[in-house]
Amino acid sequence: MRMRGRRALLAAMAGLLARPAGAQTNPALPDPALAPPPPARLPASPPPAAAPDPLPRPVAIGGLLSMSGGGWRLAFEPGADAPTAAQRLGLLRLGGHLARETTGRITLWAEAAGNEDVSTTRRLSLRRGLAVRAGLVAGGLPETRVDIRALGRVEAGRDLVDILPMGATRS
């Protein structure tokens, strides 16, 4: 029984490998049945897209001031730790703009003026930075791209948060 199975298998394989009757062979030419298929032709790939400008042109956004160094400034009322309604809308628009038009990290420089102790002004500036980050994230900017620098009270005595994309400078 085993021999019959082997013979049948060998016969089937021989039938697959057999040439059709009347086929002529030329030893100088390769057998077309054994030749590999021609290489596939891929469509031409489009040229790579230009990288987005790391320093966006400042756009006019309600409630935010464009800075000459490439960033935006959000001014706060003394003692306030949340942006106004107009500033929140501006942060939403700016968050979408930064998500689409920039790469890299965004740095928030938060300052707080006041005569309180250093710890109190630093906590106030951190709350401001967190509020600004929340507005940008709500607009579409990934939270992982935002760094907050809570400076607290500085010599200039300003109540603000500067929003600086990669490459922008404070003025």
Image (cartoon, rainbow, N blue to C red):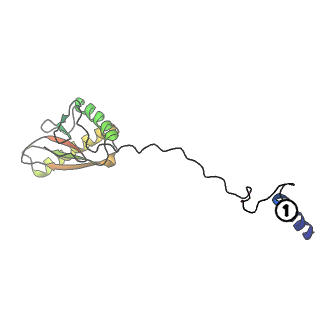
Relative placement, left or right, of 29 versus 54 is right
Q: Farthest residue in the bottom direction?
A: 3
Q: Nearer the viewer, residue 87 or 123?
A: 87
Disc 1: which residue = 14
Which residue is located at x 23 percent, y 32 percent?
87
Name the quadrant of the C terminus: top left
Q: Secondary structure at mark 1?
A: helix
Which residue is located at x 29 percent, y 43 percent?
53
Q: Is residue 23 above or below residue 113?
A: below
**Figure label count:** 1
Main SS, magenta residues: loop
Residue 40 belongs to the span the image colors magenta: yes
Mark 1 neighbour density, 10 Å: few (under 14) some (14–19) many (20 or more): few
Residue 164 belongs to the span the image colors magenta: no
Relative placement, left or right, of 42 versus 3 is left
Q: Which residues are magenta?
A: 19-44
Residue 27 x, y percent position in the rendering = 75, 63
Note whether residue 26 is visible: yes
Residue 9 x, y percent position in the rendering = 86, 64
Q: Nearer the viewer, residue 134 or 168?
A: 168
Q: Nearer the viewer, residue 75 or 56?
A: 56
Q: Is residue 140 above or below residue 147?
A: above
